[in-house]
Image (spheres, rainbow, N blue to C red):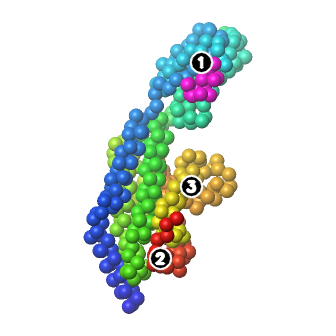
Amino acid sequence: METLNWFFTRFKNSFEGEVRQLFTQFTYHLLLWIMPLAVYSLISSIFVAGVIYDLPVGFVDQDRSELSRTIIRDFDAGPHAKLINYDNRLNDATEGLKKAKIYALLYIPPEFESDTLAGKQPTPILYYNALYYSAGLYSTMDYSGLITQLNSSYTSIMASKTGLAVPGLAKLNFIYDGLFNPTGNSRYYQQFSAVVHLLQLLVVTMTIHLLGKMSRRTPVSYPYILGKLAPYTLWYTCLLLFEIAIQVLLSGARVSSNPIYMIFVVFFYVIAAQSMGMLLYTFTRSVMTAYSLIGILVGLALTYSGVMVPEISMPKIAQIISHLEPLTYALSTLFGIFLRHVDFITVLKTCAILLVYPFLVTFIIRRRLVKRLQQKEVLE
């Protein structure tokens, strides 16, 4: 009982002392609200245009028939592509695709209309530059619908010429049940993941800053350290929830699951991020070295969290690295709360996984952290 009283008293005194000087220095303002909101505004401005329109797409029409002109005209009439005529200069069009002068290239082969009417099923080919994934993919978005429409109309023409009846097909009605505009989901996911990812960077930086400025003359204990970190746990939890709320309100997104679930996931995500900051600080000889390693941590988080490459497409070693990152679990569950009807058991599992990080880090640094806090900073 005495131990619990000592722990609580030490934690309470440390917590209250840190709250009193929460905004006493410019560094606190910078890391707690100036930089987060400035970067959040910058990220939002990048994605404010929404879906990309009028991307340059080259075409080479070697048929010059009524059908090929219809395809080109209807494709150009779509919102995402603006077609550029390369005449018969296929090599120039290919070179333009490589240099990103155009993001896609439509090639219509000779005898395209006559082969279509003869039932030979010729294929117009649409290439896009995969190195510019978002722009290249968006430039092709109107093409599949266009070809489906032409297939439907020419099936009737072929049937009337051959005298064969077109078999009846099932009529399907697609009901979209996603966030909002289906063509904007990728953009929304990128912006959402960038905000969640940014928080990890800020939390790790602030944690290292706090540990680095602790007085070497003050007796250091774990309740004292936890009391120092606790105000920032609450602050960054509220900050991320605020940023998510602003994004939801501005975009008109709909949350499929209970929004309260996000509070639990974000809270434990912040704690896991703080534990990563403690780990970096403990095993480096100076604060500057710890700061420099944040870039590696953030790079690994961005690369292997499933944001840039889906986890299922990663090799086995990359999937293992992905499962070591708290961002992977937090981002997946948070986005699942938006898109899917995530139950409370799934949220509890994610929170339990995120809670493993502080316990594991505490076990690893239990003997070294106090010694590290008592050491003088080494310039490297």
Q: Identify the amino acid type marked 3.
A: Leu
Give the labeled residue for mark 3. 300
Pointer 1 local density, CA inside 10 Å: few below 14, some 14–19, many at least 20: many
Numbered tag placed on residue 59 in the rendering: 1
Q: Residue at x 46, y 58 (%)?
A: 200
Three-letter code for the amino acid on which mark 2 is drawn: Gln
Of callouts 3 and 1, the N-terminal one: 1
The x, y position of residue 138, in whole percent, is 52, 31
| Magenta part of the chain | 92-105
Q: Is residue 62 above or below residue 186?
A: above
Q: Residue at x 42, y 58 (%)?
A: 202
Residue at which label 2 appears? 375
Q: Quadrant of residue 258?
A: bottom left
Name the residue furthest front: 379
**Residue located at (60% from left, 31% from top):** 129
Viewer-proximal residue, 235 or 372? 372
Q: Amino acid at mark 1?
A: Phe
